Amino acid sequence: MSAISFVTADTPFIDSGNTAWVLAAAALVLFMTPGLALFYGGMVRTKSVLNMMMMSFISMGTIGTVWILWGYSEAFGPDVAGGLIGNPFTHFGLHGAPATSPGSTSIMTAIFGYVAPNATTGAAASGGIPGPAFVAFQVVFAIIAVALISGAIADRAKFTTWTVFTVVWATLVYFPAAHWVFAFSGYAATTGGWIANKADGLFLGGAGAYDFAGGTAIHINAGAAGLALALVLGKRIGFNKDPMRPHNLTLVMIGAGVLWFGWFGFNAGSALGAGAQAAGVWINTLGATATAMLGWLLTEKIRDGHFTSLGAASGVVAGLVAITPACATVSPVGALIVGLVAGAGCALAVGLKFRLGFDDSLDVVGVHLVGGLIGTLLIGLLATTSSPTGAAGLTMNSGLFYGGGFAQLGAQAEGAFSVLIFSFVVTYAIGWVLHKTMGFRVDEENEVSGIDLAEHAETGYDLASFGGSRTGAFLSSTHTTSPTATSDKEGASA
């Protein structure tokens, strides 16, 4: 039951049930990033597993830091530049943001004498959740959006440059895109969200685009960024010639299971309350993921003659991606359709890298970009008042198949392709500059011998100990500080 309290100007009403659900959902979404590390880590070769997992883990460190400093303010602060970005200084260090208490002092004020205009104090957000719960829920989205990109450049990126990239990309791409896409009126100091809130669209007309939990802001965004970085770094040595099979499918399936588990927080948590809408979103998330796995496996069986564990895990992720934007605006049957189309469509799309000649190592483009597009565009066809949003009594527009015409489809396309183009162009520029200045790709020798040893002085598995050979115990002369770093070729190849 919700807590009852007297409401005054200084103590706004807090709904304990909604607050508990949002905080639990935030924890579930944060758990998804280690799940992604397992999923990606199992898909690479043995010599790259630690580097691949570290690329996800470091995102929790860098994005968690910059979110508090300027990320929240840039994503959810007052509009500047015609609504294209939030002011990063208004809530610098979360000063005046919902997470702060009245009377807190901004570090910008203390050091530079800066006074934030129209700064608010520690008020509750809408729905009875306190401001800190909203801030916490949004940061975990930013973290995983960055981590997703890493799969496109597996096996060949310098860890230092990637770490710098996470901060620059979040600042120049993710935070602005989040400001565009999310309809956060009532949860922050500004209405923002030109894509979500634009009543008549920008180019194609119609209503604002629906993106309930981040299909556009996160998955299309990360997928386009992954494509850009894959082009900047170029192909792995031996791409489309040498076998580059996943080294540990057990990790892949565990990672997919963790992602599915955490994704209920991702989607149902986006209702920002424990009510009818969240419950309906939970059901839609389950249904779409189930049919996506079936769709991927059926496509695989027809095309290749086998049902594979990698296909099952990939189908799960494809369905989760596709239902993310649509989970609140389609019916349960509509969710099944979204999942089935995404599972089959993404299974076919992952082969495009071989035909088009770009090396998207772990199919970020084929799953996240294509899956995000499928889910976002299908809203324009399948949106209905029989959805969780409609059932909750909230106003919404119907899609083409439910008598709504082409207006919503146009708005969905507008939002999706605006973010796609923006993300690709800016990410390519960021990657190119970092590549020319810091160097983004490891040298050929380190890529062949093993990026784990080169970048981290470690290996994922001490394989020499299983064979009884003493050759693997010899410490590399360049990594003598680490007892796990060896010159054993068995542990650095797959």
Image: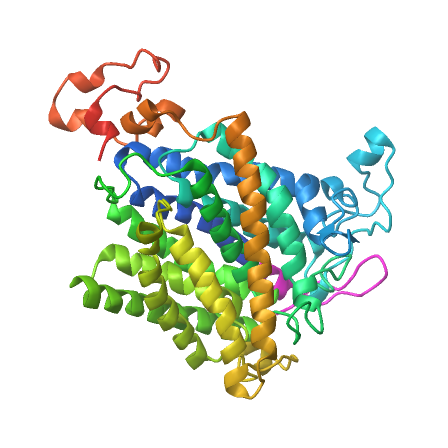
- Which one is in front, 130 or 146? 146
Q: Does 403 appear above or below 176?
A: below
Q: Quadrant of the N terminus?
A: bottom right
Q: Which residues are magenta?
A: 1-23
Q: Could you tell me if residue 462 is visible in this image?
A: no
Say whether residue 186 is left or right of residue 422: right
- Which one is in front, 145 or 100? 145
Q: Which residue lies at the image location 70% right of the left edge and 47% below the top edge?
A: 74
Percent of width and height locating residue 282: 47, 70
Q: Quadrant of the C terminus?
A: top left
Say whether residue 290 is left or right of residue 199: left
Q: Does 168 appear above or below 290?
A: above
Q: Does 394 appear above or below 217?
A: below
Q: Which residue lies at the image location 56% right of the left edge and 75% below the top edge?
A: 409
Percent of width and height locating residue 144: 50, 48
Q: Could you tell me if residue 156 is visible in this image?
A: yes
Q: Which residue lies at the image location 66% right of the left edge and 64% below the top edge?
A: 195
| Snapshot quadrant of residue 416 | bottom right
* Magenta-drawn stretch contains 12: yes
Say whether residue 195 is left or right of residue 40: right
- Which one is in front, 487 or 82? 82
Q: Which residue lies at the image location 21% right of the left edge and 41% below the top edge?
A: 243
- Which one is in front, 332 or 426? 426
* Magenta-drawn stretch contains 465: no
Q: Residue furthest bottom?
A: 403
